[in-house]
Amino acid sequence: MALSVTSILLLCILFFVIASVYSSVGFGGGSSYLAILALVAVSFYTMRSLALVCNIIVVGGSTYWFIKKGHFKISSFLPFIITSVPMAFIGASFKLSERAFFVLLGLVLITAAVFLVWQTKRLSKFNIETTTAYPPSFNYILGAIIGLISGLVGIGGGIFLAPILHHLKWGTSVKIAALASFFILANSMSGLSGLVLAGTFDTPIWAALLLGLSVFIGGQLGVRMSLKNLSPQRLKQLTALLVFIVGFRVLLVNGLALL
């Protein structure tokens, strides 16, 4: 289904809001982009392509900001990237059937919603600045698993990585946000390369430009907001509700054809 001008304008507004909220905590918003695009019934190849392009634009700016502020710890981040990037490329290279894609997407969106709620609860109950050391093998394995899932459904994977690391007290909040941003950037670029190689990259140029501009502005706004002043927990809970509802609909209607 081709995107109308009205649909694009509405998507621009929604994508701007999503980018503003997610970039403030180091995310790109890929899962929510997919949730919104599922409602306008574009092809699943277009959904994956647009979500990855928007992810790269948002977290590219966020990563630059974290580097500029001195929060970028490349030695700590590399183990996640080394394994996640090739796995994201492999995942994106799979030519899934439309039904299989929607089943997987629905499950991933529902899981992402649960993780978002879980993260906000953990952040409110525990002192996440207390950190715990883990062996390098943990970082490699976790990066590979999330990278594969990211490539399959067209998201950066930070929405899974950050809540897990917060729960395990892997690092401080700002360090985890910086890692999540860089992780999403690397995996989104890898996933996009996989789509191109597989011949499944498909997006209208004009739609990509307008949506890209919207998320760029939103991302630049969000990443400059103070986490203390923004208090994004409530907004993330509302976003989680949206992602859960849409994921449930995608799973039942598009994937399993039960409704």
Image: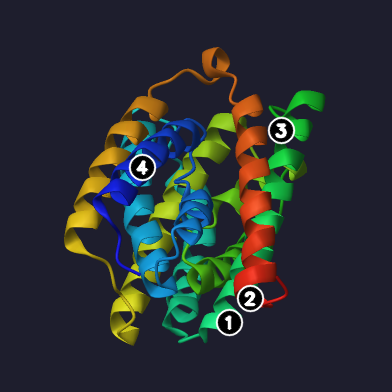
Give the image location of residue 49, x and y in percent.
35, 66
* Amino acid type at image mark 4: Leu
Q: Is mark 2 on a helix, strand or loop?
A: helix
* Pointer 1 residue: 99
Residues at badges 3 and 4 in contact (C-beta under 8 Å)?
no
Q: Disc number at residue 255?
A: 2
* Pointer 4 residue: 10
Q: What element carries label 1?
A: helix
- The C terminus, quarter of image: bottom right
Q: Residue at x 71, y 57 (%)?
A: 111
Q: Earlier in the sequence, mark 4 or mark 1?
A: 4
* Pointer 3 residue: 120
User: For this view, does 255 lie left or right of residue 34?
Assistant: right
Specify the farthest residue to the top.
229
Q: What element carries label 4?
A: helix
Tell me the quarter of the picture where residue 221 sits.
top left
How many other residues sit within 10 Å of disc 1, few (<14), some (14-19) or many (≥20)?
some
Give the image location of residue 146, x and y in percent.
60, 64
